Image: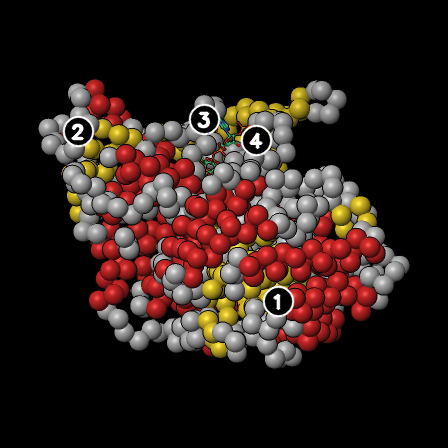
């Protein structure tokens, strides 16, 4: 069943605003129906029991909605190249059958699909890792063995074997992964390739492996098979390729027989963000544009492109011939269909949080999406209407309530929803934090969906006990969220103290010196907001809309590159500046925690390091293993554990003490109605405040909607 908005779209067929994005691309022997690529994403289904059946459904939903070309998650050509011992490999004929399922699910909808061949090299998370040289990566505990020349020859044959098996499975082509610091990239760069033979030393020798692989695959598969080469165009480390080397490499890859070149940015081990929400939208398309001037085959750009408007702008500006988006297709399977029908306002935008996708993969869980928890669970949550629709009341329209209202209405229930304020709850606060302006789009998405689905939405309506004590609704769902928890510290009522909600709302009234109690996700958020200029934290209403894309002004974008040491003039190897330029922080900030552990230790794996580094560079003083003594006119009095075991008292003379010490559930009404036997349910923070995050809240909404 197509989602309701796509039914609407069928009625309004008209010329798409996105003319460049929707234009077919002729590759000679075949053509692609538009310029969208669903970039390679590992979902975790690749290794699960019956995972390929589910993966087929996942790809099919995206193919049906118009994507031109899908690239699979990385599949290794050899055992030693697997990312982990249990990761996928395609080396044997018996493995072809399951791949055929993926391919036919995509082909039935006229989309194309390429298998990504990925050898992890020294990023292989197991003791059999191999690499050009026996040099351990800083992000792996396993030192690789250096490949012998004989093993390199065998490796090229293994790539060819995988490509031929892919062809036998009816894939339209393969993508050879040559970027992000994986094996081929390790051969190209001089720090990881210190060989003295024909595969190391000069640049010509270091790129030999990539060229031989592409040429050998082309010779084996014939002319009518797509070969994409993912080229590392900006290594972001000091031993990375220089720009003239990148150009030379690209031209030779073209000559070796590639059909398309895809853009790769950064290495996984480099401490410069390339896809997180702090990265400005479309931040790296300038690199693709530079390369496009020197090659003749079509070029794909990528990284932080999450809307049809951005994709169209990249194509119109001549940055590339195609746009690869990976996470946006997790967030919305109908991205292309909606763009085609001028309904980008109905797209569920990827907010670049990594929480539902990459962070889950790192925890060996199956990937999904924070804003779309159906992603990769399409079989568990089919888009099917219920036989007996019910009347459902939802109280609270933060993201848990919005999600529940949406999925319940989608399933055919009659939904009436109330919020004491406007929609979005805590997401409204989050959207003020630097890099999180995009959170508004999630609220906008649900709001538009509820309108299409005829959900009765009552804003600024506080529901009281009497309203519901005799309600005949089949279910009353409480998604009433959380309130900040105030710790029991002497002086907590002092005028300098405020909770994080007030601090975020009144950001501009906050003076120069601030202590933050609590160094969890919200403590970090508040610290990031306080060190930033108001414009970057979404609060400067002086800015004109044209200055902003993702809430970041042009100056803000340019500062972002300087802060992370990226040189858009590409004067040095790896595209780095001689020195990163730290911005002067706007305020003096202390971030405090009682636990004696590294601040931010529990933050998410893929983004926690960015947040810690950002605060460290801005001079935020992070103190841990302390006690709060009192708050008074002199400031916040704390007691630290000295190195000699003695306690040391310290007074932080601050203007404000901001409390970010967790939350408590707001569920009084739920408990009262439960006591009189009303059919009540509770979801999100109102159910469990401890360690609640948006991912759990939105998934809670979906799960309950499917149980009703
Ligand atoms: P949290 O992560 O649980 O952190 C609460 C902080 O308050 C801790 O540092 C804790 O450290 C301190 N604290 C707890 N009780 C205290 C007390 N009685 N007195 C003083 N300090 C106390 O909660 P949160 O920061 O409110 O975040 C809520 C949820 O949202 C979390 O699950 C978080 O991961 C999520 N979130 C995620 C992001 C993101 O970007 N991914 C952003 C914001 C929030 P000590 O007890 O050691 O002092
Ligand atoms: Fe995007 Fe976050 Fe969803 Fe991943 S989980 S696809 S980053 S919105």
Q: Look at 70% across and 63% down and name the residue there.
A: 213
> Is the CB atom of the residue marked by disc 4 within 8 angstroms of ligand 1's nearest atom?
yes
Residue 703 against residue 63 in the figure, above or below: above
Q: Using the image as rendered, state which of residue 229 and residue 695 is in the foreground.
A: 229
**How far apart, in angstroms, are the residues tagged by discs 2 and 1?**
70 Å
- How far apart, in angstroms, are the residues tagged by discs 3 and 4? 12 Å
User: In terms of secondary structure, where does tag 1 sit?
Assistant: helix
Residue 306: percent from left, percent from top: 45, 60
Pointer 3 or 4: first along the chain: 3
Residue that appears at 25% across and 23% down? 671
Residue behind mark 4: 593
Question: Which dot marks residue 151?
Answer: none
Q: Residue at x 57, y 27 (%)?
A: 594
Q: Counting residues from the N terminus, which is met first, the one under dot 1 or under dot 4?
A: 1
Q: Are marks 3 and 1 in contact (CB under 8 Å)?
A: no
Q: Nearer the viewer, mark 2 or mark 1?
A: 1
Q: Quadrant of the C terminus?
A: top left
- Crowdedness of circle 1 by 10 Å Cα count: few (<14), some, many (20+)? many
Q: Element at badge 4? A: loop
Q: Which residue is mark 3?
A: 487
Q: Which residue is mark 1?
A: 221
Mark 3 vs 1, N-terminal side: 1
Q: Nearer the viewer, mark 2 or mark 4?
A: 2
Q: Residue furthest right?
A: 196
């Amino acid at each position: 069943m197509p989602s309701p908005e796509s039914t609407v779209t069928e009625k309004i067929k008209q010329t798409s605003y996105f003319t460049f994005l929707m234009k077919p691309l002729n590759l000679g022997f075949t053509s692609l129906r538009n310029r969208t690529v669903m970039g390679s994403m590992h979902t975790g289904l690749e290794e699960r029991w019956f995972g390929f059946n589910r993966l087929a459904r996942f790809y099919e939903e995206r193919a049906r909605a118009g994507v031109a070309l899908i690239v699979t998650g990385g599949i290794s050509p050899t055992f030693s190249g697997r990312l982990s011992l249990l990761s996928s490999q395609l080396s044997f004929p018996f493995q072809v059958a399951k791949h055929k399922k993926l391919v036919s699910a995509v082909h039935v909808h006229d989309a194309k699909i390429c298998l990504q061949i990925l050898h992890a090299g020294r990023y292989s998370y197991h003791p059999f890792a191999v690499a050009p040289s026996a040099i351990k990566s800083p992000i792996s505990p396993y030192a690789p063995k250096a490949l012998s020349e004989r093993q390199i020859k065998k490796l090229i044959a293994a790539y060819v074997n995988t490509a031929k098996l892919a062809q036998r499975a009816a894939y339209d082509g393969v993508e050879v992964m040559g970027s992000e610091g994986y094996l081929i990239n390790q051969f190209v760069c001089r720090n990881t390739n210190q060989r003295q033979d024909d595969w190391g030393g000069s640049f010509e020798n270091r790129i030999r492996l990539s060229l031989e692989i592409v040429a050998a695959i082309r010779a084996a598969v014939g002319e009518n098979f797509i070969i994409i080469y993912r080229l590392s165009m900006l290594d972001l480390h000091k031993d990375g390729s220089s720009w003239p080397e990148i150009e030379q490499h690209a031209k030779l890859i073209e000559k070796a027989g590639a059909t398309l070149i895809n853009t790769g940015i950064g290495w996984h081990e480099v401490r410069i963000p390339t896809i997180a929400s702090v990265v400005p939208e479309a931040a790296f398309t300038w690199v693709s544009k530079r390369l496009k001037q020197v090659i003749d085959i079509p070029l794909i750009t990528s990284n932080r492109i999450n809307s049809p408007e951005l994709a169209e702008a990249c194509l119109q500006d001549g940055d590339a011939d195609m746009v690869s988006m990976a996470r946006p297709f997790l967030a919305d399977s109908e991205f292309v269909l909606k763009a085609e029908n001028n309904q980008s306002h109905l797209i569920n935008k990827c907010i670049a949080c990594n929480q539902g996708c990459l962070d889950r993969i790192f925890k060996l869980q199956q990937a999904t999406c924070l804003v779309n928890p159906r992603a990769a669970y399409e079989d568990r949550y089919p888009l099917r209407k219920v036989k007996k629709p019910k009347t459902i009341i939802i109280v609270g329209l933060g993201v848990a309530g919005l999600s529940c209202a949406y999925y319940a209405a989608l399933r055919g229930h009659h939904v009436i929803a109330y919020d004491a304020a406007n929609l979005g709850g805590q997401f409204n606060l989050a959207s003020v934090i630097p890099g999180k302006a995009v959170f508004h789009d999630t609220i906008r998405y649900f709001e538009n969906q509820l309108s299409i689905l005829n959900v009765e939405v009552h804003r600024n309506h506080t529901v009281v006990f009497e309203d519901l004590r005799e309600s005949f609704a089949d279910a009353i769902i409480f998604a009433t969220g959380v309130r900040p928890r105030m710790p029991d510290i002497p002086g907590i009522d002092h005028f300098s103290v405020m909770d994080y909600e007030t601090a975020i709302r009144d950001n501009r009234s906050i003076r120069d010196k601030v202590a933050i109690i609590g160094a969890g996700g919200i403590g970090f958020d508040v610290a990031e907001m306080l060190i930033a200029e108001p414009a970057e934290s979404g609060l400067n209403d002086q800015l004109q809309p044209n200055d902003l894309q993702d809430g970041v002004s042009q100056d803000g974008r340019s500062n972002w590159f300087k802060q992370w040491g990226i040189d858009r003039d590409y004067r040095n190897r790896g595209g780095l500046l001689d020195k990163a330029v730290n911005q002067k922080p706007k305020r003096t900030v202390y971030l405090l925690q009682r636990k004696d552990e590294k601040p931010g230790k529990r933050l998410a794996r893929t983004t926690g390091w960015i947040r810690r580094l950002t605060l460290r560079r801005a001079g935020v003083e992070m103190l841990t293993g302390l006690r709060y003594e009192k708050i008074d006119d002199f400031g916040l009095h704390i007691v630290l554990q000295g190195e000699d075991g003695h306690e040391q008292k310290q007074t932080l003379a601050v203007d404000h003490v901001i409390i970010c010490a967790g939350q408590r559930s707001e569920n009084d009404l739920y408990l009262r109605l439960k006591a009189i036997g009303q059919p009540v349910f509770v979801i999100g923070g109102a159910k469990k405040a401890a360690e609640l995050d948006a991912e759990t809240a939105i998934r809670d909404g979906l799960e309950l909607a499917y149980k009703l």
